[in-house]
Image (spheres, coloured by chain):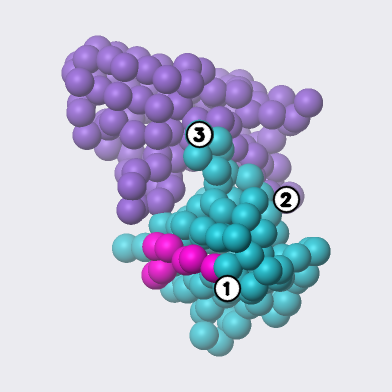
Chain colours: A purple, B cyan
Amino acid sequence: EAQVTQNPRYLITVTGKKLTVTCSQNMNHEYMSWYRQDPGLGLRQIYYSMNVEVTDKGDVPEGYKVSRKEKRNFPLILESPSPNQTSLYFCASRDRRNTEAFFGQGTRLTVV
Amino acid sequence: DQQVKQNSPSLSVQEGRISILNCDYTNSMFDYFLWYKKYPAEGPTFLISISSIKDKNEDGRFTVFLNKSAKHLSLHIVPSQPGDSAVYFCAAIGDRGSTLGRLYFGRGTQLTVWP
């Protein structure tokens, strides 16, 4: 089954404790992205990647890092999480020849 | 600065009637426009798209209209059903220049279809 898998689905952590949210897709897609969803603000892009070892900042990259060492994986790293990073995070992937993006189920992160 | 705008945060429609969701954009480099539907506790799912060279695309009860001169698109749902109640996101892709590889979203419109 074609899918984008994020882990964990829910996470509560403390300020300053490094964490990684994993994202994996099994569709051999070139493009992968991370978004955060906040009330009234919709989906804002954090980082995106057009292929292995190619990443670029989206609209709200501050406080986040990403890496794309393999085509299928695109982890999101919060080196020192802060409460303003409490949000719902989505990973997405798409084939560069198609317009439809596939989304993961989301990761609800709470930083206290 | 938001390049894709959905100015109505919510819309309430009676079952069987038409739902019209609107979206405006600012960047002329966008090549495709998409609508995504999102239920609570799930990721967004693709609904329908339209190329910038077309002005209409239809898929069952869903039709998207594009007015390039006005930089405006709309999603029509006819007839509306209670299961259509969800947040609808308008999105745009421009696979060239500064927009290459990126998918831009609006803030979403919460559609509620009541019996």
Whether the magenta-drawn stretch holds residue B9 is answered as yes
Q: Image quadrant of residue A6? A: top right
Q: Is residue B95 visible?
A: no
- Which numbered disc, 2 or 3, marks the residue closer to the eye? 3
What is the chain letter for disc 3? Answer: B
What is the chain letter for disc 2? Answer: A
Q: SS at mark 3?
A: loop
Measured as percent of width and height from the top left, residue A33 is found at: 52, 38
Q: Residue at x 39, y 70 (%)?
A: B7
The residue carrying mark 2 is: A98
The residue carrying mark 1 is: B20
Q: How many marks?
A: 3
A36 shown above or below B113? above
Q: Residue furthest bottom?
A: B69
The residue carrying mark 3 is: B41
Looking at marks 1 and 3 on the same chain, the residue that comes earlier in the sequence is marked by 1
- Which numbered disc, 1 or 2, marks the residue closer to the eye? 1
Q: Is residue B68 left or right of residue A43?
A: right
Q: Give the distance between the C-alpha atoms of the residues marked 1 and 2, in whole angstroms.
A: 26 Å
The range drawn in magenta is: B7-13
| Amino acid at dot 1 | Ile
Q: SS at mark 1?
A: strand
The N terminus of chain B - image quarter: bottom left
Whether the magenta-drawn stretch holds residue B102 is answered as no
B56 shown above or below B83? below
| Amino acid at dot 2 | Asn
B62 shown above or below A103? below
